[in-house]
Image (tube, helix red, strand yellow):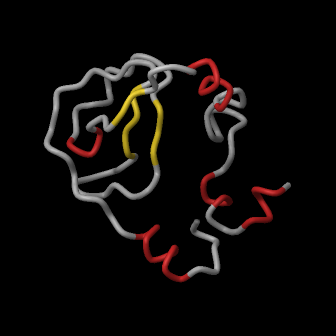
Amino acid sequence: ITYSDDQELKKFARQTIPDDPKKNSHFRPGLISFAGNGNNSRTSQLFISYGSAPSLGREKWETPIGEVIEGMENVDKFYSYGEMPPWGKGPQQGKIHGGPAYIEE
């Protein structure tokens, strides 16, 4: 949505979402959370946990908001390329935000 011509959509994409009340959650496969990097920093970007992650769930912005109940085998296919560079062959986030050409190639 960050490379859309729709100005309202762009405005929405830049808005932050207040943190939920902190829960002591241990991330396990299938938990869904907003991505964030500080207090009240969440946006429309979500992530799905692929495994146990002791480092996640400690901060307010990492409070799980949902869980994959069935079909995790399909979610696993999203990860077939691995992490983003330099750790894997996944997409480069900066290029994704630069426009549709990177996504379409």
Classify residue 94 by image quadrant: bottom right
Relative to 60, 7 lies left or right: right
66 on left or right of 86: left
Q: Nearer the viewer, residue 38 or 24?
A: 24
Viewer-nearest residue: 17 or 81: 17
Q: Nearer the viewer, residue 16 or 74?
A: 74
Residue 81 against residue 36 in the figure, above or below:
above
Question: Percent x, y for residue 52?
Answer: 40, 16
Tell me which residue sits at (68%, 46%) in the image.
91
Residue 85: quadrant of the picture: top right
- Image vertical order of residue 28 relative to residue 97, above or below: above
The C terminus, quarter of image: bottom right
Instruction: Name the residue rendered at 32%, 27% in the picture.
Output: 55
Q: Quadrant of the N terminus?
A: bottom right
Q: Residue at x 66, y 58 (%)?
A: 96
Q: Quadrant of residue 76?
A: top right
Q: Residue furthest front?
A: 70
Q: Position of residue 75 (x, y in %)?
A: 59, 27
* Tag count: 0
How far across and how far down the image is residue 62, in percent?
29, 39
- Residue 73 image point, x, y percent: 62, 18
- Is the residue 76 above or below the residue 15 in the image? above
Residue 20 placement, left or right of 100: left
